[in-house]
Amino acid sequence: MTIHPSVIIFPGAKIDSDVEIGPHTVIGKDVVIKKGAKIGPNVVIEGWTTIGAGCQIYTGAVIGSPTQDLKNEGKRSYVEIGPENIIREYVTINRATKAEAVTRIGKGNFIMTNVHIAHDCILGDGIIMANLTTLAGHVVVEDRVVIEGLTAVQQFIRIGRHAFIGGYSKVMKDISPYLKVAGQPTEVYGINTIGLERNGFSEERIKDIEKTYRILFRSKLNVTQALKRLEKIELTPDTVHMVEFVKNSTNGICR
């Protein structure tokens, strides 16, 4: 364990072995930092926050601060961050609003400079969020999503796995899995073929996704009609997820 002498650690914090903490960082009394994490200088980790094993947190990040929600009652709520996340400079991650609720981040995500993750967000694994991306409250981001810089995501939005969102976008509707979108507001520009290939999808899997995509997003059918047509087609696990995501949308789907 390597902890700079200027670090402030409040009694009650639990810090595992092999943790590194840089100068002038503050660790609150209910914080848990697991093995092998590296915390940079001038970081503040407070509230009921857990930092997973092997995470890297860079200068000036503020994690576990109270929610920026006027409904916040100041009761105990959590931030849970899984293992092997990279959290770059000046990222802010807020606790959940309601008592005992959680803002949760999975494993292996790359969260770049000045990203904001608001209260009650749920992030999966392997996500890349570029500089100055902001997630409002209650946003759900599934695995392997890429969000380019200066993108703003409205509250309660869901973003499906393996989606790609271009930079400087305004996301006001749910983004279906596997899509490539951009704009203000966002529009669909096709399947995220490059992302799927990079994540090991075979040509056959991509073709199946493409067929479902064309019925949902490129036919002249409305969503209800498209879903009825897809009931007559044999779906793969990938396309079942895509269809179920659309069925369960409460915000409307970006088309």
Image (cartoon, rainbow, N blue to C red):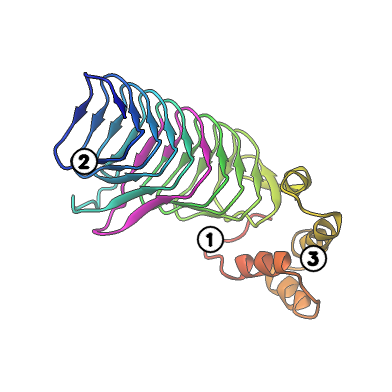
Q: Is residue 39 left or right of residue 154?
A: left
Which of the two marks, 2 or 3, is nearer to us in this view? 2
Answer with the quarter of the image where residue 244 lies: bottom right
Which residue is rendered at x = 73% and y = 78% of the image?
Answer: 228
Circle 1 sits on which residue?
251
The quarter in which the N terminus is drawn is: top left
Give coordinates of residue 149: x percent, y percent: 57, 31
Circle 3 sits on which residue?
215
Answer with the quarter of the image where residue 44 lies: top left
What amino acid does circle 1 point to?
Asn
Q: Please say if 246 is above or below 177.
A: below
Which residue is rendered at x = 72% and y = 44% of the image?
Answer: 195
Label 2 to label 1, Cα distance in Å?
Answer: 40 Å
Of callouts 2 and 3, the N-terminal one:
2
Label 2 to label 3, Cα distance in Å?
Answer: 53 Å
> Could you tell me if the residues under marks 1 and 3 are in contact, i.e. CB atoms within 8 Å?
no
Give coordinates of residue 247: x percent, y percent: 61, 71
What amino acid does circle 2 point to?
Ala
- Magenta span: 91-116
Give coordinates of residue 36: x percent, y percent: 40, 36
> Could you tell me if the residues under marks 2 and 1 are in contact, i.e. CB atoms within 8 Å?
no
Q: Secondary structure at mark 3?
A: helix
What amino acid does circle 3 point to?
Ile
Of callouts 1 and 3, the N-terminal one:
3
Q: Classify 10 Å Cα crowding around label 2: few (below 14), some (14-19), many (20 and above).
A: some
Circle 2 sits on which residue?
13
Which residue is rendered at x = 21% and y = 19% of the image?
Answer: 6
